[in-house]
Image: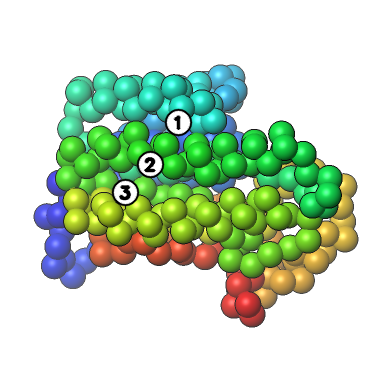
Amino acid sequence: MAEENIGSIEPDFSLKGKLAIITGASMGIGKEIALAFAAAGAEIIVTARTESKLIELKEEVEKDGGKCHFLVNDITNINQIQDLADFIREKLSEEEKDLVLVNNAGFGFTKPVLEVTQEDFDLITSTHLRGTFFCCQKIGEIMLERGYGKIINLGSTWGYTTDAKKAPYCMAKAGIAHMSRAISTEWAPNGIRINTLAPTGTVTEFTQKTWESMPERAKGILSRIKLGRFAYPSDHLGAAIFLASSASDFITGQTIYVDGGFTAAG
């Protein structure tokens, strides 16, 4: 549908006419992306495991005149990913829209390699890798049927560089970026664009608690951010809206770092 903007000299950053799905949208970066997409004109579907937070988000969006649906959903469960795909098809049957998927759901932990358990490892991989892959597969199938779609996978600067006590997380985020590139080469001829958005250390409810308990670690991360401060969720919204909009229609298979210069020094 959005191919009609080819050749335009004025980039279109509006998300009107789009149905955007954001996983892990109950807090942090995912919540802020959901609010920003709604403000930019998208109808949104938000998912997470905590119903009360999704209800609050829906009320906040609708208070400002937006349109929001929610589904309690765990992306580590492939059957629930299929439920999400079915939910999307139901909404598309009511109104024709371009699809945008933001695979944001994730988590991390800090542990020495020798202390990582199989449960720790499996939870990281089932969320970041398996969950992201099957969300791409199930929702990408709908995009392929329609000949257009945008997928934004949330990576990290830790997918580019490394740090002590973060081995499983670094591995998973590197995998997400490579997954995006691999799928992009297969689906580009069908009009699907897939890119990775890679934040640096970002102030959220979760990271604040972690950094307060590990001040030296927080200081070390901050020392690598050349702009001299941690990111906030709002710092990632411009890139997210750009990648979701038709302004980025000639970009696929890329990783966009929003990192204050973190990766510039290698």
| Residue at the spot of label 1 | 46
Q: Quadrant of residue 22?
A: top left
Q: Residues within 10 Å of mark 3 (few under 14, many from 20)?
A: many
Question: Where does the C terminus fall, quadrant-wise?
Answer: bottom right
- Residue 2 relative to residue 73: left or right: left
Q: Amino acid at mark 1?
A: Val
Viewer-side residue, 204 vs 23: 23
The secondary structure type at the circle numbered 3 is strand
| Residue at the spot of label 3 | 150
Viewer-side residue, 49 vs 190: 190
Tag in front: 3 or 1: 3
Total marks placed: 3
Residue 143 location (% of width, % of height): 25, 40
Viewer-side residue, 237 vs 114: 114
Real-space Cα separation, disc 2 to disc 3, in angstroms? 10 Å
Tag in front: 2 or 3: 2
Residue 199 seen from this side? no
Work out which residue is located at the far bottom of the displayed protein and give it.
265
Q: Quadrant of residue 264?
A: bottom right
Residue 37 location (% of width, % of height): 40, 43
